[in-house]
Image (cartoon, grey):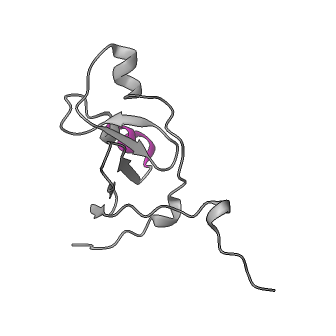
Amino acid sequence: MQTTCSHLAQIQNPSPNTNGCEECLKMGDTWVHLRLCETCGHVGCCDSSKNHHATKHFHHTKHPIMRSIEPGEDWGWCYMDEVTLEPFPRRPTASHKRETPR
């Protein structure tokens, strides 16, 4: 069983595309918890929800990493390596990159 994620370089820190599960909103359905695709910003419902849209998004796109966007939660999941990422490793943004001393 793998204990590390080999896809961390694919974390893009995208903004969520919607304020709820994209597919559930279109269907007029409900969800339990929300997950954010770290490749493209797709918001899908969790596997405790009846529609499992976050996992379906992975199977359709092969985007490997999602993270919880529930308040107070700081974890993610790599579908390919089947490993939990906690705390969730955020990719440094341009404003967070360390300056090289001159």
Q: Is residue 48 above or below residue 30?
A: below
Predominant secondary structure, magenta span: helix
Residue 88 shown left or right of residue 84 in the figure: right
Q: Nearer the viewer, residue 69 or 62?
A: 69
Q: Is residue 59 magenta?
A: yes
Quarter of the figure that contains the N terminus? bottom left
Q: Is residue 51 above or below residue 10?
A: above
Q: Which residues are magenta?
A: 56-62
Please tell me which residue is depicted at 22% across the width and 39% down the height of the picture.
47
Q: Is residue 36 above or below residue 88?
A: above
Please tell me which residue is depicted at 45% across the width and 43% down the height of the picture.
61
Is any atom of residue 18 visible in this view? yes
Quarter of the figure that contains the C terminus? bottom right
Give residue 60's position: percent from left, percent from top. Answer: 40, 39
Specify the farthest residue to the top.
28
Please tell me which residue is depicted at 31% across the width and 42% down the height of the picture.
55
Q: How many marks can you see?
A: 0
Residue 91 shown left or right of residue 100 in the figure: left
Q: Nearer the viewer, residue 48 or 64?
A: 48
Is any atom of residue 78 visible in this view? no
